[in-house]
Amino acid sequence: MSSESTAEIIEATGRALCEHGYADLTMQRIAAESSVTSAAIHYHFDTKEELLNAFLDDLLDRFESRLACEARDPRERLNEFLDAVFEEPSSDHDDFPVAMMELKAQAPYHDVFRDRFVELDSVVQDVVATAVRDGIEDGHFDDADPEQVARLVATMMNGAHVRSVALGEETTRTREAIEQTLALYLGWQPGSEVRA
């Protein structure tokens, strides 16, 4: 199967997952969201879990690419991290938040899904902890435990995700709370002018 067909199946999986949820997701419903037949989907992916694992890989790859930052200044890295995490969706049909919530709900029952979310959490915490550690070493931030700050930020991000998907709450409120928390822990206000 071509990479175009695989990409189409992955995109269709996101749409079908958002529309029908995990429990009612079938290969036929995914096929209905694409120009690929359910037989072709079955040929490439033996099970729904295998397809969802590929879908989750794609989601996590997209998220990690949004987190990529080449800035040397740790303050700038934290600002860009927050911009990436709280970026407005590029369209009204952004499947990322709902699809992530559907798959997070399955993580206790599917080790593969859980492993992906552990990996994602590790990436998020590593980005934050490294920036905090570098900022302390450079004298930009007050002394703090980088791992504790990173864990708190990751936890607040997860809470923002749940509140956004389940309650329809704007994520800007959580971003403000994270910024206030970073100011308390680090003595630095994200979004303030960065001086090299």
Image (cartoon, rainbow, N blue to C red):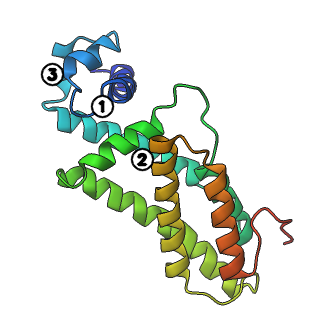
Residue 62 appears anywhere in the view: no
The residue beneath circle 2 is 60
Ranked by sequence position, the earlier of labels 3 and 1 is 1
Of badges 3 and 1, nearer the viewer stands: 1
Real-space CA distance between mark 3 and mark 2, rounded to the nearest whole angstrom: 24 Å
- Mark 2, other Cα within 10 Å: few <14 / some 14–19 / many ≥20: some
Of badges 1 and 2, nearer the viewer stands: 1
- Residue drawn 29% across the image and 48% down it: 105
- Residue drawn 44% across the image and 46% down it: 61
In terms of image quadrants, where is residue 115?
Answer: bottom left
Up-down relation of residue 21 to residue 111 (above or below): above
The residue beneath circle 3 is 43
Of badges 3 and 2, nearer the viewer stands: 2
- Residue drawn 50% across the image and 49% down it: 163
The disc labelled 1 sits on which kind of residue? Gly
Real-space CA distance between mark 3 and mark 1, rounded to the nearest whole angstrom: 23 Å
The disc labelled 3 sits on which kind of residue? Tyr
Provide residue 100's location: percent of width, then percent of height. 39, 43
What is the tally of numbered marks visible in this picture?
3
Identity of the residue furthest to the left in this view:
46
Up-down relation of residue 166 to residue 145 (above or below): above
- Mark 1, other Cα within 10 Å: few <14 / some 14–19 / many ≥20: some
The residue beneath circle 1 is 21
Provide residue 106's location: percent of width, then percent of height. 24, 47
Is 43 placed left or right of 172 in the picture?
A: left
In terms of image quadrants, where is residue 14?
Answer: top left
Comparing 163 with 60, the one in front is: 163
Residue 152 appears anywhere in the view: yes
- Mark 3, other Cα within 10 Å: few <14 / some 14–19 / many ≥20: few
Is 109 placed left or right of 134 in the picture?
A: left
Identity of the residue furthest to the front in this view:
167
